[in-house]
Amino acid sequence: MKSFAGVALSALFASTAQASAWNPEAWHGEIISAQVFLSADSASNEFDQTFRLDQYSKTVTQTFAKLGLTDRLALIGTFDWQDATIVGPGVNVSFSDPSTVSFGLQYQLRRKEGHAVALSASYFAGIDLPPKLLTIENREPVVELRGLWGESRTWGGINLFAEAQMAGRLDLDGGYAGAFSQLTVGADPLDRVKLIGKVRYTDVAGGVFENFPLARQERVEVEGSVVYRLRGRNYVEIGYVSLVTGRNTVSESGLKLGVWTKF
C-alpha cells in the first residue's frame, strides 16, 4: 500500500461562499462569513484505492465580499483560512494556513425581474500548504473566468429560485488549471426562512509544485442549508456539507455555520 502522504490528502477544501448572478447597486454590497467544521475517516487516490485515516479534523473560516462599483460592475473577493489536523499512513501534520485568496470583477450582462446573467474574472493567488499535502485548490496563481445565470419565480405563494455557475481556470502561462461548476436550487417557504441546496463539481489539473508531483484532483459534493433573516439585512445560516465522490480527495463531511450581511 502506498504512503498516504504522497497520494490522497487532497480535500483541504470546504465549500467557499460564492458570488451570485445578481450584482448589488452602486456602493451597496454584501459580506458572507462562515465556518465549516469537517471530519473524515477515509480518503481515496487516483486509482480509486481507499485509505483509512487515524485522525482528520478541519475548520475552514470563509469570507466572501461583493461591492457594487456601478449598477453593472462589482468588485468581488474571497479569503479562506483553514486549521487542520491529519494523521494517517505516513503523515502526522497539524497546520493553520490560508486556503483561498482571490479578487476580481463581476459584470452584469443582463438583469430583469426574476432573471440575471453575469460574467466574472478573478485572480487567485497561489497557496503554500505543507509540502507533503495535496489540496483541491491551485498551488500556483491562476486566472478564473466564470459565467453565472439565475432565475427566480413565485409559485403558489412561494418564491423558488435556481442558479448555475460554470468556471474555467488558466495558469499565468495560459495552460488549463481547473474547472468549477455549481447548481443551486432553493425556496422561501416562510417570510424569514430560505432553504438552499447545492451540488458542486471541482477539477484541478495535475502538475509539479516545488518538485512535488500533484495528481489531477476531482470532487463532487452536496450542501444543504437553512437561512434565517434577522432584523434589517442580516441573515444566519446553518447547513451540512458532504463529499459524494472524488479522486485524490478526503471523504469529509460536516456542519456549516454562516452569517450574511448586506449593506
Image (cartoon, rainbow, N blue to C red):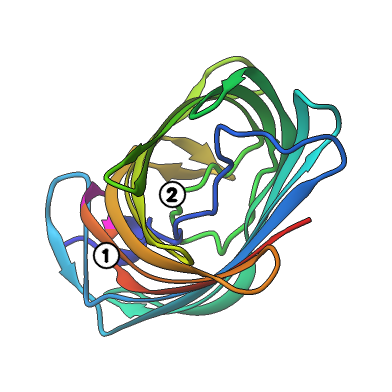
Write down the quadrant of residue 98 in the picture. bottom right
> Residue 248 colored magenta?
yes
Write down the quadrant of residue 134 in the picture. bottom left
Give the residue pinned by disc 2: 136
Residue that appears at 45% across and 58% down: 13
Residue 104 vertical position relative to residue 224 in the rendered view, above or below: above
Residue type highlighted by circle 1: Ser
Residue bounds of the magenta highlight: 245-249
Residue 16 vertical position relative to residue 154 in the rendered view, above or below: below
Quadrant of the image containing the N terminus:
bottom left
Give the residue pinned by disc 1: 3
Q: Position of residue 168 (x, y in %)?
A: 49, 24
> Which of 192/68 is in front?
192
> Residue 48 colored magenta?
no
Name the mark nearer the viewer: 2 or 1: 2
Residue that appears at 23% across and 48% down: 246
